[in-house]
Image: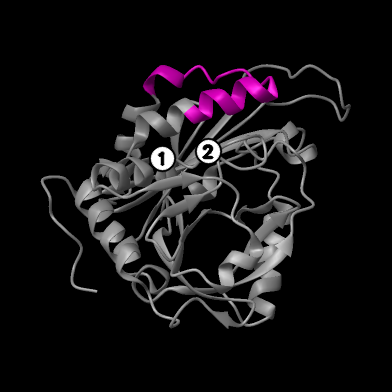
């Protein structure tokens, strides 16, 4: 029996009630964050909450009255669900109004938080890698906002599964934009890390930011520029990053193997660095 946090109270999930007039339900007017915890400690929570603030401001949604206490609420939610390693999902919508595009919400924003247990380092994606497909990116042009309007990503992921692969990478006229729920990195033949620079066309991933910092500290050369689709054919390695993927090797794209079709040394090195970071005190991942 799970406990969620809803508008100022901890309640059993089956007892939670949200109005059918909530604008998150009628218009998809909401934003969210996913923050992982390892051994009871959140990973980069300040960055996630700062991005939440940016998304709220961009959408004109008022911050919930619990904003200053969100970190402590997240910790208590883990404890109430007896979760030490897993995630907290946090969603804010503008609240209730009549079914009208421009109606002002009545009352407070809706804040809902839930938690799930997960051992991220033991997922098949992290340990073994993923196979992906390419799809033209015809989504809206504010992908930098972490909105709950995720139907295009849901459709892309379901299409990938129907085609026998794990996920989808989007592309536009400039190159690869992002994964359906991740940022994309390529390692070229010289060992340079290549990833698309931030803009309104992709989400500023918190894991992406941390990987770039760890890679720079480790002496890797980084080139922030669009990845051309043709480069995937000659890439030494490719991987994706996200809060739940952590760092996942990409083994093939549209049925064509990346290099030898196995996770590369740079990807594995960055996995170790990131695992050590999230665990604290330099503990690396289990042998992979």
Measured in 3D between alpha carbons, the distance from the residue under mark 1 to the one under mark 2, in whole angstroms, is 8 Å
Residue depicted at 34% across the width and 61% down the height: 120
Q: Is residue 169 left or right of residue 286?
A: right
Mark 2 crowd level (few <14, some 14–19, many ≥20, 10 Å Cα): some
Q: Residues within 10 Å of mark 1 (few under 14, many from 20)?
A: some
Give the quadrant of residue 31.
top right
Instruction: Examine the rendered structure and indicate whether residue 160 appears above or below residue 148.
Output: below
Q: In the image, is 163 to the left or to the right of 49?
A: right
The answer to whether residue 169 is magenta is no
Name the main secondary structure of what is drawn in magenta.
Answer: helix
Residue under label 2: 204
In the displayed structure, does residue 55 sit left or right of residue 59? Answer: left
Q: Give the x, y percent position of residue 73.
A: 36, 30
Rendered view: 152 above or below 259:
above
Say whether residue 66 is magenta.
yes
User: Residue sitting at 30 percent across and 69 percent down?
Assistant: 265
- State whether residue 223 is above or below residue 254: above
- The quarter holding residue 180 reads bottom right
Which residue is situated farthest in the front direction here?
190
| Residue 108 in view | yes
Residue that label 1 marks: 209
Q: Classify mark 1: helix, strand or loop.
A: helix
Q: Position of residue 45 (x, y in %)?
A: 36, 34
Image coords of residue 41 (percent x, y): 24, 41
User: What x and y, as percent, mark residue 274?
Assistant: 28, 52
Which residue is painted at 31% across and 48% down in the image? 215
Where are the magenta residues, as a range?
51-69
Q: Are marks 1 and 2 in contact (CB under 8 Å)?
A: yes
Q: Is residue 159 left or right of residue 75?
A: right
Between 273 and 191, the one nearer to me in the picture:
191
Question: Foreground: 3 or 272?
Answer: 272
């Amino acid at each position: 029996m799970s406990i969620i946090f809803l508008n100022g109270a901890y309640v059993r999930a089956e007892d939670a009630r949200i109005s059918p007039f909530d604008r998150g339900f009628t218009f998809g007017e909401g934003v969210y964050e996913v923050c992982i915890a390892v051994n009871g400690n959140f990973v980069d929570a300040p960055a996630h909450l700062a991005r939440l603030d940016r998304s709220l401001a961009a959408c004109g949604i008022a911050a919930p009255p619990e904003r200053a206490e969100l970190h402590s609420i997240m910790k208590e939610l883990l404890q109430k669900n007896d979760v030490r390693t897993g995630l907290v999902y946090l969603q804010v919508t503008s609240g209730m109004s009549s079914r009208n595009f421009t109606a002002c919400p009545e009352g407070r924003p809706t804040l809902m938080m839930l938690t799930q247990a997960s051992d991220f380092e033991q997922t098949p994606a992290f340990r073994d890698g993923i196979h992906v497909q390419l799809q033209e990116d015809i989504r809206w042009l504010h992908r930098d906002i972490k909105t709950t309007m995720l139907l295009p990503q849901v459709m892309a992921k379901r299409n990938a599964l129907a085609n026998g692969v794990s996920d989808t990478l989007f592309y536009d006229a400039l190159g690869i934009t992002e994964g359906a729920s991740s940022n994309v990195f390529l390692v070229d033949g010289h060992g340079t890390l290549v990833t698309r620079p931030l803009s309104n066309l992709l989400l500023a991933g918190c894991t992406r930011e941390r990987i770039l910092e760890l890679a720079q500290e480790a002496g890797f050369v980084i080139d922030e520029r669009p990845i051309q689709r043709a480069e995937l054919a000659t890439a030494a390695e490719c991987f994706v990053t996200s809060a739940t993927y952590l760092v996942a090797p990409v083994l093939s794209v549209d049925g064509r193997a990346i290099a030898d079709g196995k996770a590369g040394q740079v990807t594995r090195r960055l996995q170790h660095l990131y695992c050590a970071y999230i665990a604290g005190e330099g503990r690396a991942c289990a042998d992979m």
